[in-house]
Image (spheres, helix red, strand yellow):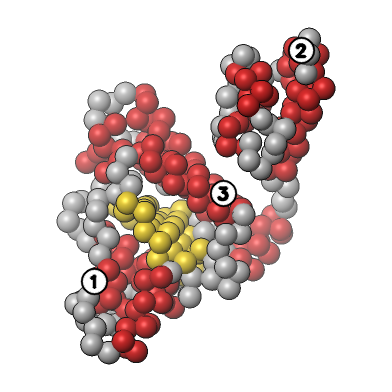
Amino acid sequence: MAPLKSLQQEYPLVDSSFQAFCASHGIFSVEDFLLYDVDVLISSADKQSTSQRLKQGINQLLYIIDALHQPLLTGLDLLEDAKRNKHSLSTGCQGYHWIDVLLGGGLRQGQLTELVGPSSSGKTQACLQFAATVAKKHLAFVVYLDTCNAFSPQCIAHFVGRSSSPVFNDQADHKPLQKVLDRIICYPVFDIFQMFDVLHQLEINLRSEMFKSDCQVRLLIVDSVSSLITPILGGGGPQGHALMISVGFLLKKLAHEHNLAVLASGRAASEMHAHDLVSGLSSSP
């Protein structure tokens, strides 16, 4: 859930004074607010000199929560939504059409797909291939979280059908590649908390319709999740397992609420000794 301070710009009633009042009750996020007894909080606000504004802030938070609440859907509603919005994005793997067949047509929007395998098995190459295909064939934005400093424009150029060399003599021939690369937004991410920041900012951008209506974000790639999680899970502590579950929840939430195809690559759970990789990521909403 969002921290209260992140709401201040969009909701002026959730200002620093209101945040300080909430903090005095141990409330720092929307989730904390949900867990707190609202009647007790209102009674406490009544005792303050700024009680009216504090109660307005409480009502503002209740409005925000109500707006975020997803309406109940029938099975028929979900079926119609799947037919209308949950399209499959072809992986573009020439000679390996069985991948699309295995995935039911490709990477499906609204769902999270795992790409799991040992080190040096070609996971990053596959991620780059998928990114190039979606940016070129579907004319869509791709958000690429690169956790291993492995993103390669040369590989994208190769997949687009150009030389792997970054030098092009004919600028006219270079334009198709430029358009594809312009649609792939790469974020270097080197720790789990930075990834959370990037994903939360992406969620804000998607809600504010920052991207052009004629070129929406349709694919989010995290290559790879395990490189961020393994250092934390190495000790086998509860913090790492909780973070893994949180990552899975946030990725599935982004996929479902913004109709994204989400691809997360990583080493096999047996290599990581982290069963939470499966429980956190495997099921789709």
Q: Is residue 174 visible?
A: yes
Rendered residue at 17%/56% (across/down)? 120
The amino acid beneath tag 1 is Gln
Q: CA distance from mark 3 to mark 2?
A: 33 Å
Tell me which residue sits at (54%, 49%) in the image. Answer: 203
Give the left or right position of residue 224, taking residue 263 as reference.
left
Q: Quadrant of residue 58?
A: top right
Q: Residue 71's x, y, as percent?
A: 73, 47
Q: Which mark is residue 263?
A: none
User: Mark 1: which secondary structure?
Assistant: helix
Numbered disc in front, either 3 or 2: 2
Mark 1 vs mark 2, CA separation in Å: 62 Å
Q: Which residue is mark 3?
A: 204
Residue 154's label in the rendered image is 1
Q: Is residue 65 visible?
A: no
Q: Earlier in the sequence, mark 1 or mark 3?
A: 1
The N terminus, quarter of image: top right
**Measured from the top left, where is residue 213 in percent x and y?**
60, 69
Q: 234 above or below 153? A: above
Relative placement, left or right, of 256 versus 230 is: right
Q: Which badge, 3 or 2, is on the more N-terminal residue?
A: 2
CA neighbours of label 3 inside 10 A, class few (<14), some (14 to 19), many (20+): few
List x then y, in percent, for residue 60: 75, 34
Picture disc at residue 48: 2
Can you tell which quarter of the image residue 49 is in?
Answer: top right
Q: In the shown orientation, is residue 263 left or right of residue 32?
A: left
| Residue positioned most to the left | 120
Q: Position of residue 229 (x, y in %)?
A: 31, 38
Three-letter residue code for mark 3: Ile
